[in-house]
Amino acid sequence: MDTPISGSVYVAPSLSTALDALHEGGSAAAPFAGGTWIMRAPIRHEQLKSRYVAIGKIPELHTIKVDADAVEIGAAVTHAALATALAELGEFDVLTAAAGHSANPAIRTMATIGGNLATTAFAAADCVPALLCLDAEVEIASRDDRERTSLEQFLTMRSTLAPGRLLHRIIVPRRDRKTVHARLPLRRAGDYPTAIVSLAMILDDAGLVETARIAVGSVEPVARRWGRLETALIGHPLNAAKAAEAAAELADEFAGRDAADVPGWYRVRVLPGLVRRAVAALGS
Ligand SMILES: Cc1cc2nc3c(=O)[nH]c(=O)nc-3n(C[C@H](O)[C@H](O)[C@H](O)COP(=O)(O)OP(=O)(O)OC[C@H]3O[C@@H](n4cnc5c(N)ncnc54)[C@H](O)[C@@H]3O)c2cc1C
């Protein structure tokens, strides 16, 4: 097996030193968070960067701030820490499940939410669809400025993010909503999910769907909202069978990605079943 190319790792003690180091390293440098994706670069036959700036020791990137209007999550918060912190907040069930059921327990203590969102080539990232359905925004930091943008927009620009920039934190608005994360691994724990459906619904006083957010992950190279299915569910009561029927009618808009584990058509085929499971869980 090829041995990884040797390089340098700078362990940044603060956000400002990390941003300085990334700025100076330019395109040769990248953040190193949990390392769970980076460590597998040789398996994917990818070149490692020659400089990594480790961000795991920066206290402010580990904070989770719960306010009345929003929850702010530092980019280096691990999946395990996130799942624990949000466990009592029902409106975030989707994110608690995404962070708390991804990979396996050992990986979850290392993998970070920032790494999950920033990894361009990782189609099966659990937190991406979960945060899309929660209308999350992200803050990107560089030595000279901070930029806030929607997660949806970030996903379109992350592969061309200028050197020296870092995902700093994730901001999730608080709403009185019901949410759920349905994922289908091929076998059991530890597998990447074949397909993911994340839902967030607000119901009106009559129990009809007032707003719907549905995000699909792992089916296409980048997770995205399923706008036509959202529209189809608005104004109706939660009904798992009807939602699955609508999903079956609309699923042909997805071009499933082929990969060694699963062909693309299969990822699309399982979507109605996942929608059924998710809506049934919301109704219970
Ligand atoms: C066997 C295995 C199975 C897994 N299964 C799943 C799964 O089913 N679902 C799931 O969601 N995850 C899974 N993961 C974990 C996955 O690797 C992480 O969720 C995540 O994608 C990487 O987070 P990290 O902190 O380890 O990132 P790293 O490996 O440190 O970095 C990954 C990439 O993101 C960049 N990066 C990291 N942090 C930032 C930042 N703050 N700003 C800008 N760029 C940044 C790095 O430069 C690098 O390019 C699995 C991991 C393994 C090893």
Image (tube, grey):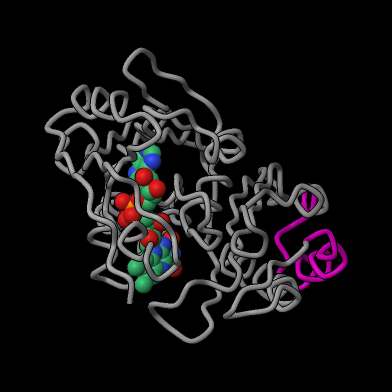
Q: Main secondary structure of the magenta part?
A: helix
Q: Residue at left 37%, top 66%?
A: 42
Q: Is residue 193 above or below residue 56?
A: below
Examine the rendering and report whether any part of residue 5 can be seen.
Answer: yes
For the N terminus, the quadrant is: bottom left
- Residue 229 screen position, x and y as percent: 78, 54
Outermost residue toward the left? 13
- Residue 134 screen position, x and y as percent: 53, 43
Rendering quarter of residue 191: bottom left
Examine the rendering and report whether any part of residue 114 can be seen.
Answer: no
Front in this rendered view, residue 115 or 70: 115
Asked if the magenta segment contains residue 28, the reply would be no
Outermost residue toward the right? 249
Extent of the magenta region: 233-254
Q: Residue at left 63%, top 79%?
A: 262
Q: Quadrant of ligand 1?
A: bottom left
Asked if the magenta segment contains residue 237, the reply would be yes
- Residue 255 screen position, x and y as percent: 77, 63
